């Protein structure tokens, strides 16, 4: 029987009992994309007014869950520990639950809920009492020019989004490093920063001549079968190419750039088919930064790793 890259995690389900995580829907995140700084401001703002309960909501223990629902707090705290901020998005239940944009939240935790900002000059619209929190989103990860694999070849992720491409290619659930199989998958949605912002970009260059440009928290597959954040890798480590081969990192440049970051999420939910190919290398999809946070850095079973890729002495 073919050995898969990722061990089967039987406890990994999409039930709310297993995850507080919410799968951000395209209409919500695309409609209300924030920068990393704005995402932090939105979350802090929402949590503050949940506690303040400005509309005197008496249910939910005196907390206003229309600002921030406590079921997302654990996931949000885990994300902060990993270096990024989830932010709430909202809908209008009095208008067929259409997305509602304009909660205060581009500034700081001290933003007023009534229509004026405290300690910031960024304008915003207050959140009416009936507007409900509908989930969480997060900023993207790839720079716009990074090419993801589609059915007819690689295309820059920004171009793919703007062209409406949904024909994403990922690893097959049966893929292994020694026998990489690809799957004609579909895009559930893309994520992107609403505005360009200053953010830290890592540029990896490999011995084969390849290059990959991502933000610091982007999940990358390594030859021992783990997913690591880009900031955890350096010169002498290796990426894994689309053929399952290790490609040594020979240089790493770190630069703050004013740009938008992008990511993509396939419709499939198993771990292996959420590995996409970007710039010819195996990367974790957006799912590994939301509902699969707990799978980051999880070792696969040693038997699933081809011996040639297991470091000597292990």
Image (spheres, helix red, strand yellow):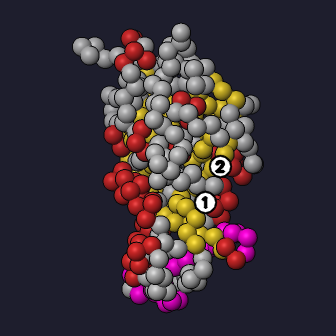
**The quadrant where residue 11 appears:** top left
Regarding residue 51, the answer to whether it shows in the image is yes
Residue position for label 1: 29
Tell me residue 17's x, y (percent). Answer: 47, 48
**Up-down: is 29 above or below 58?**
above
Q: Which image quarter holds the C terminus?
A: top left
Tell me residue 173's x, y (percent). Answer: 58, 25
Identify the mark nearer the N-term, 2 or 1: 1
Residue drawn 32% across the image and 28% down it: 236
Disc 2 is placed on an element classified as: strand
Residue drawn 38% across the image and 21% down it: 301
Residue 189: mark in rendering: 2
Residue 9: mark in rendering: none
Residue bounds of the magenta highlight: 95-118
Q: Is residue 259 found inside the magenta-colored segment of the image?
A: no
Contact, mark 2 vs mark 1 (Cβ under 8 Å): yes
Foreground of the two, 203 or 52: 52
Residue drawn 74% across the image and 31% down it: 152
Q: Is residue 105 found inside the magenta-colored segment of the image?
A: yes
**Up-down: is 151 above or below 290?**
above
**Up-down: is 269 above or below 67?**
above
Residue at the limit of the structure toward the left, as seen here: 313
**The quadrant where residue 130 appears:** bottom right
Residue drawn 63% across the image and 61% down it: 28
Tell me residue 305's x, y (percent). Answer: 41, 17
């Amino acid at each position: 029987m073919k050995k898969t890259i990722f061990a089967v995690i039987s406890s990994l389900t999409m039930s709310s009992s297993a995850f507080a995580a919410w799968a951000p829907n395209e209409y919500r995140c695309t409609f209300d994309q924030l920068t990393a700084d704005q995402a932090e401001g939105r979350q802090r703002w929402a949590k503050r007014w949940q506690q303040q309960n400005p509309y005197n909501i008496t249910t939910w223990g005196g907390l206003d869950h229309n600002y921030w629902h406590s079921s997302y707090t654990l996931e949000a705290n885990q994300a902060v520990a990993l270096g990024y901020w989830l932010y709430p998005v909202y809908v209008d239940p009095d208008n067929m639950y259409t997305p509602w944009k304009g909660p205060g939240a581009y500034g700081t935790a001290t933003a007023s809920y009534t229509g004026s900002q405290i300690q910031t000059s960024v304008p915003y619209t207050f959140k009416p009492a009936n507007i409900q929190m509908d989930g969480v989103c997060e900023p993207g990860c790839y720079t716009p020019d990074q090419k993801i694999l589609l059915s007819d070849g690689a295309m820059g992720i920004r171009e793919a989004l703007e062209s409406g491409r949904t024909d994403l290619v990922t690893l097959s659930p049966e893929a292994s490093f020694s026998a990489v199989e690809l799957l004609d998958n579909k895009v559930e949605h893309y994520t992107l920063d609403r505005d360009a912002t200053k953010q830290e970009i890592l540029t990896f260059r490999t011995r084969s001549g390849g290059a990959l440009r991502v933000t610091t928290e982007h999940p990358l597959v390594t030859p021992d079968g783990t997913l690591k954040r880009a900031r955890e890798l350096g010169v002498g480590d290796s990426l894994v190419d689309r053929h399952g081969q290790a490609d040594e990192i020979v240089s790493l440049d770190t630069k703050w750039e004013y740009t938008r970051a992008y990511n993509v999420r396939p419709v499939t939910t198993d771990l292996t088919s959420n590995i996409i190919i970007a710039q010819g290398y195996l990367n974790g999809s957006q799912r590994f930064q939301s509902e699969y946070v707990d799978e980051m850095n999880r070792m696969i079973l040693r038997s699933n790793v081809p011996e040639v890729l297991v470091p000597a002495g292990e």
